[in-house]
Image (cartoon, grey):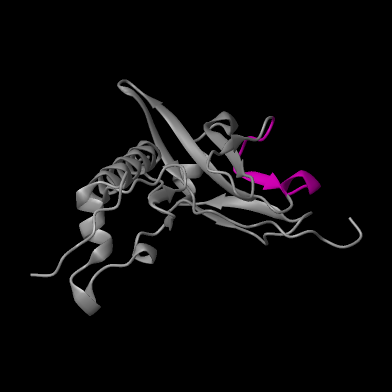
């Protein structure tokens, strides 16, 4: 049986993890987001040295993202294939398309246009944008866009979201 030196301040389980079991064992660099500095393991914020804790954190984040997606992807009857058409370029016109009878029956206020800034996770409602078409402006350059159609029902509302378009490209001279 080989002797494993105990590193002060480092939990035994982590010492065993870092020591591994010979050539096939784990090394400090195997803990993504963490590094061994002297006798301490330092991790970036949000990353833990406990793999099980890290898995729990990631599962919670995934579950939260799935709940957000589920809230948008409820579906409006007749708008199963809500799609944005048009060029993702400043000055172009994006148009929401679906079955003709589905779109024709909707008031302009049912269409909610959103943009997502580069590197961000939260969509922003584009104030004043409504109806099935949206003219892309300089404020949209480098952003991603989508439209959400919301229809009130007796139990709340139903929503359908288009695919994401972008990032929107600038048009030289505009």
Can the viewer see residue 10? yes
Q: Is residue 13 left or right of residue 165?
A: left
Towards the viewer: 160 or 8: 8
The percent position of residue 137, horizontal first and vertical second, equals 77, 47
Point out the stretch of residues depicted in magenta: 128-140
Q: Is residue 170 above or below residue 63?
A: below
Q: From this viewpoint, which residue is outermost toward the right?
A: 173
Q: Is residue 75 magenta?
A: no
How many numbered marks are there?
Answer: 0
Q: Is residue 5 left or right of residue 99?
A: left
The percent position of residue 158, horizontal first and vertical second, equals 37, 33
Q: Residue at x 35, y 59 (%)?
A: 31
Q: Is residue 130 magenta?
A: yes
Task: Indicate the quadrant containing the C terminus: top left, top right, bottom left or bottom right.
Answer: bottom right
Q: Is residue 159 above or below residue 153?
A: below
Towards the viewer: 105 or 135: 135
Task: Indicate the quadrant containing the N terminus: top left, top right, bottom left or bottom right.
Answer: bottom left
The quarter of the picture where residue 114 lies is top right
Towards the viewer: 109 or 45: 45
Towards the viewer: 115 or 31: 31
Q: Is residue 90 left or right of residue 46?
A: right
Q: Is residue 16 left or right of residue 45?
A: left
Q: Is residue 153 above or below residue 125?
A: above
Q: Residue at x 26, y 43 (%)?
A: 53
The percent position of residue 126, horizontal first and vertical second, equals 65, 35
The percent position of residue 161, horizontal first and vertical second, equals 46, 45
């Amino acid at each position: 049986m080989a002797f494993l030196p105990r590193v002060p301040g480092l939990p035994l389980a982590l010492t065993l993890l870092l020591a591994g079991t010979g050539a096939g064992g784990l090394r400090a660099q195997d803990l993504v987001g963490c590094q061994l500095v002297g006798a301490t393991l330092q991790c970036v914020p949000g990353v833990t040295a406990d793999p099980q804790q890290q898995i729990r954190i990631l599962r919670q984040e995934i579950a939260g993202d799935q709940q957000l997606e589920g809230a948008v992807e409820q579906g409006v009857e007749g708008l199963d294939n809500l799609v944005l058409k048009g060029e993702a370029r400043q000055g172009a016109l994006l148009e929401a398309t679906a079955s003709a009878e589905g779109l024709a029956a909707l008031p302009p206020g049912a269409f909610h246009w959103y943009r997502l800034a580069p590197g961000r996770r939260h969509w922003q409602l584009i104030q004043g944008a409504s109806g099935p078409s949206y003219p892309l402006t300089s404020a949209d350059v480098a952003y991603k866009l989508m439209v959400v159609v919301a229809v009130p029902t007796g139990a709340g509302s139903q929503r359908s979201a288009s695919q994401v378009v972008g990032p929107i490209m600038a048009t030289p001279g505009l």
